[in-house]
Amino acid sequence: MVDYDIACQAVQDDNADPCLLALIAYENPEFTPNVASHPMAYPGLLAWIARFGNEEAKKIVMRRLATESNPLSLSSAREGGASYTPEQAMEIKDAMVQHDIAQNFPELRKYLAQNPNCYAELLEWFESLDDPEVNEALQKRRAQEE
């Protein structure tokens, strides 16, 4: 296990070794939010945190995804790129895939906005777009929730 003092130093060092950060996140879960917000956290580590981290860390990763350039694009990582159907956008539960759809497939945003599993930060981002089709989808979503 990574020593507590070493973990404290590493998460405060902007030039920390990314491999050490991964080890800290794995062995010291209480530091996962710190690692999630660290500038040296690489895309694979952020993806791991989004899947296995605590709720606070997951929210940090999702905020980073919503505000930073797309460091975790799933579609760019796949050969030939990914493609999704409207049905998938309306049902997908994985937040990483939701982000990928929102970022790389704007024509599917209106379907994703209706997804009951859509994470809150993404819904907030949709509202900020002021896209008429997305706004209509968000209204449908609200009507279904009532």
Image: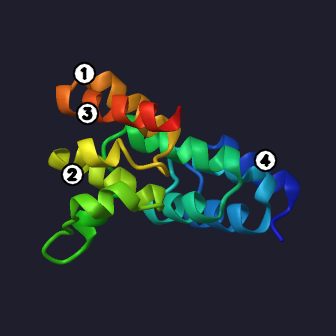
**Residue at the extreme right of the image, as rendered:** 4
Residue closest to the eye, 51 or 111: 111
Distance CA(mark 1)–CA(mark 4): 42 Å
Residue closest to the eye, 10 or 63: 63
Tag shown at residue 8 = 4
Q: Earlier in the sequence, mark 4 or mark 3?
A: 4
What's under tag 1, amino acid-wise?
Asp
Q: Give me the residue at 35% from left, 25% from top.
A: 127
Residue 38 seen = no
Are there few (<14), some (14-19), or many (20+) residues within 10 Å of tag 4?
Answer: some
Rendered location of residue 79, percent (x, y): 18, 78
Distance CA(mark 3)–CA(mark 2): 15 Å
Q: Residue 3's image quarter?
A: bottom right
Are there few (<14), some (14-19), or many (20+) residues within 10 Å of tag 2?
Answer: some
Rendered location of residue 144, percent (x, y): 45, 38
Question: Label 2: which residue?
Answer: 104
Protein image colouring: rainbow
Question: Label 1: which residue?
Answer: 130
Q: Quadrant of the N terminus?
A: bottom right
Residue 82 seen = yes
Distance CA(mark 4)–CA(mark 3): 43 Å
Rendered location of residue 22, percent (x, y): 62, 65
Look at the numbered disc 4 and give the secondary structure of its residue. Answer: helix
Q: Give me the residue at 79% from left, 61% from top.
A: 28
What's under tag 2, amino acid-wise?
Asn
What's under tag 4, amino acid-wise?
Cys
Where 106 falls versus 88 (above or below)?
above
Tag shown at residue 134 = 3
